[in-house]
Amino acid sequence: MRSEPGGRSRLTKSGIVATARAIADAEGIDALTLRRLAHELGTGQSSLYRHVADRRELLQLLCDDLAESFPIAPPCSTPASWLRTHWALTYDFLAEHPWAAQVIASGEILAGGGEDTPRRVAEVLVAAGLAVDDADRAVRALWNLVLGHLLNAHPFGHLDGGPPLIDCRADYLWALDALLSGILRPGGAAAAGGGGQHG
Amino acid sequence: MRSEPGGRSRLTKSGIVATARAIADAEGIDALTLRRLAHELGTGQSSLYRHVADRRELLQLLCDDLAESFPIAPPCSTPASWLRTHWALTYDFLAEHPWAAQVIASGEILAGGGEDTPRRVAEVLVAAGLAVDDADRAVRALWNLVLGHLLNAHPFGHLDGGPPLIDCRADYLWALDALLSGILRPGGAAAAGGGGQHG
DNA sequence: ACCTGAACACCGTTCAAGT
DNA sequence: ACCTGAACACCGTTCAAGT
């Protein structure tokens, strides 16, 4: 892990990102300091700036790296069941890397889970009968629902006191079913508005 | 703003929170440092610790303070239209205080928009025919959808390049309609699952 | 060309000392 | 009892200097 056979320098971008990801996965995003990262790589903290512009770029690289290993559900009998399985997989995957949602939420990084995955989801939605614009909107809605559930894992909850914490995953799956039901509903989501004057 | 008439000391908890909120509203959560806050209050930074345990508690107080002024929609003809109007109001309110969603997402604070507002929403959902458990789940789903849309305001977007940024509010309203449609659907959201084996 | 230690301007937090 | 300045242990980032 200390030297790449092909490269001429010990320190490489991919090596930095791999070590950074290991720290973030194991101890959270706050533990990922440039000093800590440099120490883990056996180098000085200022050496990192030869390969990465600043901390923001490091986080961006970290998110891009994670996006490449995003899960994608295998083919399924119906669009509805594929979508449910796929977004359950997405939740489970992101739940194992809690720093990702936090980094996205910090606002300085642009998100989206790579390129291929959201496109594939949009294709399934179009195949299910949605207009292309609505399919894109639905992808963003599903993505934001996951993010919200991951980030707000203990809403209305008791951090110290109450023992019966909410089952976050079951909560998310319930919401996912509701959202998918609304998205795939005949006539589309736009037909469901209560006629509120907010627009 | 510097001295409370009734109190004997210049520095009060509510004064600290008010000034902190002003800074966060105007310049974002990162600008809200204890040094800056103390300077704004005309005092030393260590004096704040007499009234607030640490930065975490300050953020908690800030969220509690905001929760008290959460909007609540006026009575409406149908539950569906009330829910849509109410959650559009909630989005607009939180969009004016972007630090709130970020603080919640940071994970150290427990959220939920006070006590009264979520209870009122749950009541409307029960009146619309949901079981009490499902009503609570629906409140959390709606809340997390707002959070996700606020935090991930530029998904799949171009931070520097592309000019045609997504209309985040319209995006949210589309997702809100879809989710409400799924929640209020006859039979409930649980009936909509695609039969996926993920449980 | 690549790396390094020391330094700079910040943080949150603590503490002995003031009134 | 309440407040204060100085200090501590951290950050991200820069820069002159090494090889």
Image: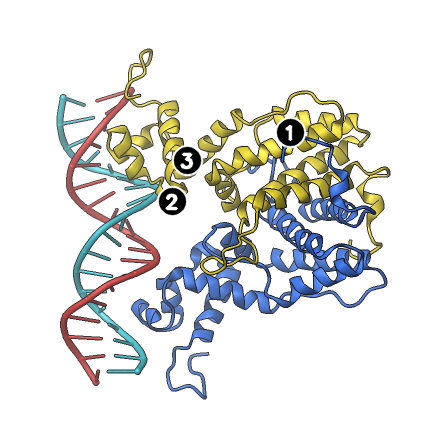
Chain colours: A yellow, B blue, C red, D cyan
The x and y percentages for residue B177 are 77, 47
The x and y percentages for residue A43 are 24, 30
* Upstream in sequence: badge 3 or badge 1: 3
Instruction: Answer few, some or many: residues within 10 Å of disc 3's Cα (few below 14, many 20 plus, some between 14 and 19).
Output: some
Depth check: give the residue in front, B86 or B46.
B86
Compared across the picture, whether B74 is left or right of B112 comes to right
* Upstream in sequence: badge 2 or badge 1: 2
* Upstream in sequence: badge 2 or badge 3: 3
Residue occupying image coordinates x 52% and y 63%: B63
Kind of residue indicated by mark 1: Pro
Q: Using the image, determine if residue B45 lies above or below residue B186.
A: below
Compared across the picture, whether A15 is left or right of A123 comes to left
Instruction: Answer few, some or many: residues within 10 Å of disc 2's Cα (few below 14, many 20 plus, some between 14 and 19).
Output: few
Kind of residue indicated by mark 2: Asp
The x and y percentages for residue A199 are 78, 53
Compared across the picture, whether A41 is left or right of B52 comes to left
Depth check: give the residue in front, A156 or B142.
A156
Residue occupying image coordinates x 45% and y 32%: A62
Residue for badge 3: A25
Q: Using the image, determine if residue C9 lies above or below residue D16.
A: below
Residue occupying image coordinates x 73% and y 26%: A124
Quarter holding residue B89? bottom right
Residue for badge 1: A118
> Numbered disc 2: what chain?
A
**Badge 2 vs badge 3, beta-carbon distance below 8 Å:** no
**Badge 2 vs badge 1, beta-carbon distance below 8 Å:** no
Residue for badge 2: A30
Residue A112 is at least partly visible in this image: no
> Numbered disc 3: what chain?
A
